[in-house]
Image (cartoon, rainbow, N blue to C red):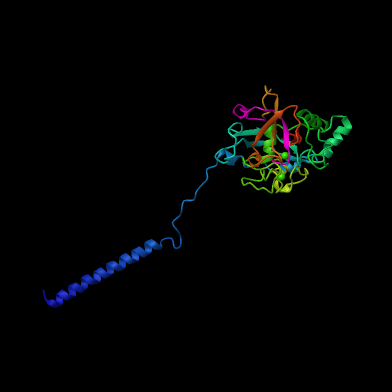
Amino acid sequence: MHTSQLTHLTMKIQNKLKSLICLLILLMFVLSGCGGDEKIPVEEEVLEPTDEMEILEELPKEEENTIDIPEGMVFVPAGDFLMGSDPDKDPMADPLDELPQHKVYLDAFFIDKFEVSNADYSKFVAATGHRNSIFWDNPKFNHPDQPVVGVTWGDAAAYAEWVGKRLPTEAEWEKAARGTDGRIWPWGNEFDPTKCNFDDEGKFDGHLDGFAMAAPVDSFHQGASPYGAVNMVGNVAEWVSDWFDTDYYSVSPKENPKGPKTSGMGKKSWRGASWFAGLDHMRCAFREYDDIVASGQIIGFRCAMDAPKVE
Ligand SMILES: [Ca+2]
Ligand SMILES: [Ca+2]
C-alpha cells in the first residue's frame, strides 16, 4: 500500500473512532440527562397503619359542640383507647398489673376537670351530716382549694351520688388521663417535671414543682390531659369505682369494663398517684389499691357521669 493511502486510511480510522467516541459521549449525556433535574426516586418510608394509629383518628370534634357539658366537667367521646402499658415503650411499666396493653371501647362520659376540693366536700358535709375528712382540722390538708383527702371509698361514692354523679371506672379514669393513643403521661410521651405535682426530690418532701404537699385543684393546667382534665397524674391519687385485681387486664371485657365483680381482698383501685410518690408512679397506666375503708392523706377523688348517646 502506498504511504499516502496508508495515512489516509489511518486518518479515516481515527475519524471513525472520534465519531464513535463523540457518539458515546452524546449517548451518555443523553442517558444521564434523562429527566432533567429529576433525582432517582428514593422510596419513601410508608408507615403501615396499626391498630394504635387507627384509633388516633378521634371521633368528630363537632360532637363536643353539640353536647351540653356540665359545668366543671370535660367530655370524653365514645370510642376505643389503649389501656395498660407496652413495656417496649414504657420501661417503667409494672409487669405485675399493667399488662397486657389492650384496646378498650368506652361509651361517652363526662369527668370532673378537677379533683374534688375541700370546699366542694364541705358543702356535702354541711348538707347531709356525712362525716368530714379525717384531716378536716389539719392545716397541711384542709385548705379549701386543696383536694379533699382522708376520705374512704364509701365517702367518695356518697359524695358523688349527692352531686348526681358517680365515681369513674378504672378504664374511664385512664382514658380521661391519656386519650386514645397509649401515651405515658397526659401531655405526651416525654416526662416534664413542671407538669404535675409529685415527689420530685425523691424524699417525700419534693417541692421543685412548687408544692411540697397537695396543690390547689385548679393548678397544673400545663399538664392537662387531651380532654382537659388536670392533675390526673400527681397531686392526690383518686379512688375509682372498680374492685382491684392484679390480673384483670387479661380477662377484662373489651367494652365498658367495670372491674371484677368482687374482690376477695376487699381492695378498691385508685389511680394517678400523688404528691407523695416518685416519678415511676406518675404515669397514666399506673395502678394501685387500698382497703375500701382506708382514708389516707394522699387519696382523694373526682367524679364522672354518663354522657348522652349521640345518634
Ligand atoms: Ca411536689
Ligand atoms: Ca390526681
Percent position of residue 84, x then y: 61, 35
Q: Residue lying farthest left?
A: 1
- Say which quadrant the C terminus sits in: top right
Percent position of residue 265, x then y: 68, 23
Q: Residue at x 65, y 39 (%)?
A: 281
Percent position of residue 49, x then y: 55, 42
Dividing the image into four quarters, tell me where ligand 1 lies.
Answer: top right
- Magenta range is 233-256
Q: Is residue 212 magenta?
A: no
Q: Quadrant of residue 123?
A: top right
Tell me how many marks there are: 0
Q: Quadrant of residue 179?
A: top right
- Say which quadrant the N terminus sits in: bottom left
Q: Is residue 254 magenta?
A: yes
- Residue 106 showing in the rendered view: no
- Nearest the viewer among 284 and 180 is 284
Q: Residue lying farthest bottom?
A: 4
Query: Left or right: where does residue 10 sit relative to residue 135?
Result: left
Query: Left or right: where does residue 188 sit relative to residue 18?
Result: right
Query: Left or right: where does residue 46 sit relative to residue 272?
Result: left
Percent position of residue 10, x then y: 19, 72
- Nearest the viewer among 171 and 219 is 219
- Nearest the viewer among 162 and 121 is 121
155 versus 213 height, above or below: above
Q: Quadrant of residue 288?
A: top right
- Residue 238 showing in the rendered view: yes
Q: Residue at x 81, y 35 (%)?
A: 135
Q: Residue at x 73, y 33 (%)?
A: 239
